[in-house]
Amino acid sequence: MSTGLRTDANPAELAVEHASAPLALMARLAGSGLFDDYVVYERPGSWTFAGGMLAEVVLDADTVRAHWPGQAPVIRPWAGRPSDALRDTFADAPLPVWNAYGWIAFEFAAPRPAGRLAHLIVPRAEVRAENGRVTVTGVDEADVEQVTELLAKPDGHSVGEPSPVDVRTGGTPYRERVAEALGEIHARRYQKVIVSRRLDIPHPVDVVSTYVRGREANTPARSFLLDLDGFQATGFSPEVLASVDASGHVMTQPLAGTRAFGLGAATDARTRHDLETDPKEIYEHAVSVRTSQEELYRVCDQDSVHVTGFMTVKERGSVQHLGSSVSGTLSPGHTAWDALDALFPGVTASGIPKPEAIEAITRLEERRGLYSGAVVTVSHDGALDSALVLRALYAENGRAWLRAGAGIVSASTPDREYEETCEKLSSIAPHVVPRIWSAAGRNPPCRNSLTSKASAGCSPSTPGSRSPRCRCSTPASSAESPPGA
């Protein structure tokens, strides 16, 4: 990705040495209240906090809205591929250098999409932590100074204690959906489908603290924490959906085949051997890798597409997976958006063939939203990186929930697939931190955007609102599905 953002050739930028761990820095920034909207994105060796909204792109089922600095918002209809709608919108960005951060819903790939499909921002400020060095870049000096002052303070974000969530609920309806999918597989309607289940959390959640506790216990390929227009999510992605560098090199990392991990050296070794020798798991992984190859053939020079690290065991928190990497080089005329379109949604979170599996998912489940979608970063130089959203927590309108699924093939059994969802949920369920209320039972104070002052009251967020939003989450019920539901 590009190393900064700017509206002209001279952005405000400051590089400092910092002794704090990157995770603590990201939590401090996210929990500070300096910015209403933010995205934290971790790649190997690099952590980025993108705060504030310089520009915004929102993709809904029938319109795309863009709001660039100094211009009135523009709303226009779109048709065709949603990736083309995003590509064309960012091509019109009146910024010489920019990075964008945000999320894409699973329904981005639905044949008849509904609801919010994507939400990305170009931030006012970026904070990048790499190798003990922190670089703060902003569109003006005031943003950079505020962030730098915050980082210089000795105290960090207060991290709460987790209250584990029981994952062994909802077994009967989930097993029934797996049995229904197995019937369709035996009828040869498709080869594989991922059937997931939602687990509601019965209390408000401190999402920033949950990110810290969960990241301390997980070994993700990517991690993220975001709050965009009041929708919050944090997760520890086990695999890279699509990573494209500025030169056009593409990589995806399908993981399929799962066993529990972290149960002790002897048990872990036994389950690893079972994973590596189970015909059902090997088949599930092999067909996923083959599908990823076929998808890259559509956008890459065919001779450049190859598989590395085939069926390597990847340890991801409470589970271990069979993993492989598939890579290639974009052929002339193709961009990172084409690579994302070819690979989205991840084969390991949808099924084979994808169109039939996606159709089955829309019948067997409620709207997924961000689950099995992607958190994405994209840059003016053509680079793109996206994490498959699994092992995540979601929160909006006072509700918080988890979600996990399992890959169903002809050799699956409902009991084993339910157990697999419990294993996956255990990557985050033990680390959920409740939000602590004041002794008087009132809402905690709220932080206003770009201030350090607390406001005792809060009001509901309004889509598209630029007013400061409340960070306190109170139990609420809503007939509407939130964007990431």
Image (spheres, helix red, strand yellow):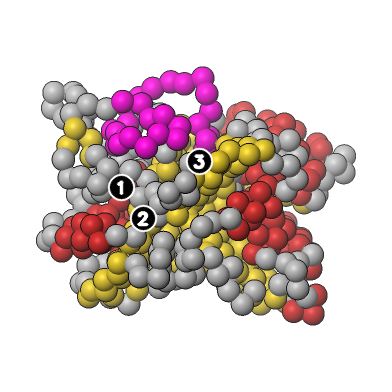
Q: Which residues are magenta?
A: 459-485
Near mark 2 (Cα within 10 A), the count class, few <14, some 14-19 or many ≥20, is many
Q: Choose between 24 and 383: the one closer to the eye.
A: 383
Where residue 124 is drawn, which disc sits there? 2
- State the image coordinates of residue 110 (x, y, percent, origin top left): 71, 41
54 horizontally vs 322: left or right: left
Residue under pointer 1: 35
In the rendered structure, which amino acid carries the disc numbered 3?
Pro
Residue under pointer 3: 73
In the rendered structure, which amino acid carries the disc numbered 1?
Phe
In the rendered structure, which amino acid carries the disc numbered 2?
Arg
Magenta segment: does it hold 464? yes
Observer-side mark, 3 or 2, equals 3
Which badge, 3 or 2, comes first in the chain's sequence?
Answer: 3
Q: Are marks 1 and 2 in contact (CB under 8 Å)?
A: yes
- State the image coordinates of residue 265 (x, y, percent, origin top left): 44, 67
320 horizontally vs 153: left or right: right
Q: Which residue: 52% across, 23% down?
A: 480
On screen, 242 above or below 425? Answer: below
Near mark 3 (Cα within 10 A), the count class, few <14, some 14-19 or many ≥20, is few
On screen, 125 above or below 453? Answer: below
On screen, 257 above or below 67? Answer: below
Q: Choose between 200 and 186: the one closer to the eye.
A: 200
